[in-house]
Image (tube, rainbow, N blue to C red):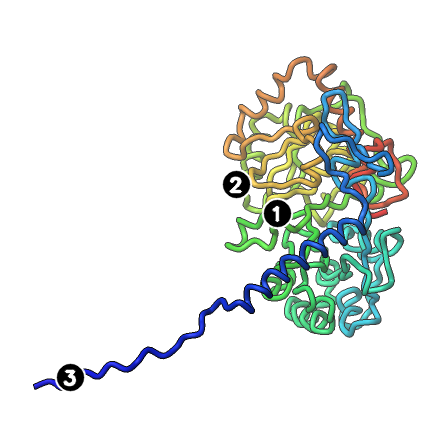
Amino acid sequence: MSQPRVFQAHAHITPFFTRAHQVAALFLVTATFFLTRLFDQSFPPSSCYLDHVRPSPNVNLHVAKTNGAGHVLWPDRGYGSHLSLKIYVYEDNEIDGLKELLRGRDRSISSNACLKGQWASQVKIHRLLLESRFRTRKKEEADLFFVPSYVKCVRMLGGLNDKEINQTYVKVLSQMPYFRRSGGRDHIFVFPSGAGAHLFRSWATYINRSIILTPEGDRTDKRDVSSFNTWKDIIIPGNVDDGMTKRGPTIFQPWPLSKRKYLANYFGRAQKKVGRLKLIELAKEYPDKLECPELQLSGPNKLGRLEYFQHLGNAKFCLAPRGESSWTLRFFEAFFVECVPVILSDQVELPFQNVIDYTQISIKWPSSLIGPELLDYLGSMPDYSSWQADKMLVGLRSRVGTMLYNASINVGASEESKAISPVH
């Protein structure tokens, strides 16, 4: 027979919200209200107002400039005309290992030796920031931190191997308290080649939150994981030979369209890439329309700097297929020989796409349709030798300034083009 259960008297449970809690909550609400009013009175009125509300005449509002169509013009369309920014540039002697990333293990590689090829943008951006009006020498007031490194050049010249690059980067980052403070979110790195941040093998562990400047926005042909994140990283122009971007006469002056021999050309190595191989075969079938020699990097058939740009500028259209990665330097070189770029890379991202309307100064063609139809299309553009050509060439000339790294250079770029770069 079961034992009868004995019921105990209910213990008294203190309510969660007591009168003391209610009084405290009321005090908190009241204090928040008065503090908010206090802060509102401490700052000038906001410049954001509805159309039917007139701003105070004592408030100096900046009104964005627009064109006839109502579109916001530069610089307001991009970074704004009142950019306030402080950038700290790390000195090579303040962190152990930084000199190795700049000059190699024995510190024998000079920065001038790295002022050529694709990797030169690492040096040029570093030098621009050293002279920039946005530079600060106080870490505590910096909005962003620039980490100088010439590892692409150093690697190519034998100054560091891949393992040494990885180890040195890790050592350098471990000595940066401001990097640890933000998880690297406010630190900037430049990786100027198709390899992107993959030059630093452990990038995903250490700098996946940092800002990366690179001409490479896609690595789908190399790795499953791309180091480029379109939400935080920035696509920069590829570095073009200084002989074509210097002040004054360049090594090659663009020829009139009427004197150009070919409809289109492609100068580059095949690299076993389908698109490039298709162009080489197409040139064999239409040699009078398409010039497409195998580019030699050494030996007696290697083209000199002048010869290369002479050939590049001997066509109306410069074809720019993807190579090891989605971007190609020929797209940027085409601007300086006034040859209309034809992009044959489906995944490519271009610099300043939110500012430059590339449909006005270039043509994008599906890489899967490289064949006779491409040449037919280029050849059928209405009266290309006059109106269409002039329209595109005017656009090319106005955008040349956006592809330069030397702040002192002026090759007729418009004020809008110059305003795109916030560095100097």
Tell us which disc is closer to us: 1 or 3.
Answer: 3
Under mark 1, the amino acid is Thr
Using the numbered discs, state the Cα–Cα distance from disc 1 to disc 3 in whole angstroms: 72 Å
Under mark 3, the amino acid is Pro
Q: First in sequence: mark 3 or mark 2?
A: 3
Q: First in sequence: mark 1 or mark 3?
A: 3
Q: Where residue 331 is drawn, which disc sits there?
A: none
Q: From the top left corner, tell me how far across and down residue 94 is, in percent.
A: 82, 71
Per the image, the residue denoted by label 1 is 230
Q: Secondary structure at mark 3?
A: loop
Question: Eyeballing the image, is 330 above or below 1?
Answer: above
Quadrant in which residue 317 is drawn: top right
Per the image, the residue denoted by label 3 is 4
Quadrant in which residue 314 is drawn: top right
Q: Residues within 10 Å of mark 3 (few under 14, many from 20)?
A: few
Q: Secondary structure at mark 1?
A: loop
- Residue at image coords 77%, 51%: 121
Comparing 197 with 107, the one in front is 197
Q: Where residue 274 is drawn, which disc sits there?
A: 2
- Left or right: 126 with respect to 283? right
Q: From the top left corner, tell me how far across and down residue 93 is, in percent.
A: 84, 71
Asked if marks 3 and 2 touch (Cβ < 8 Å), the reply is no
Tell us which disc is closer to us: 3 or 2.
Answer: 3
Q: First in sequence: mark 1 or mark 2?
A: 1
Q: Let me know if residue 304 appears in the view.
A: no
Under mark 2, the amino acid is Val
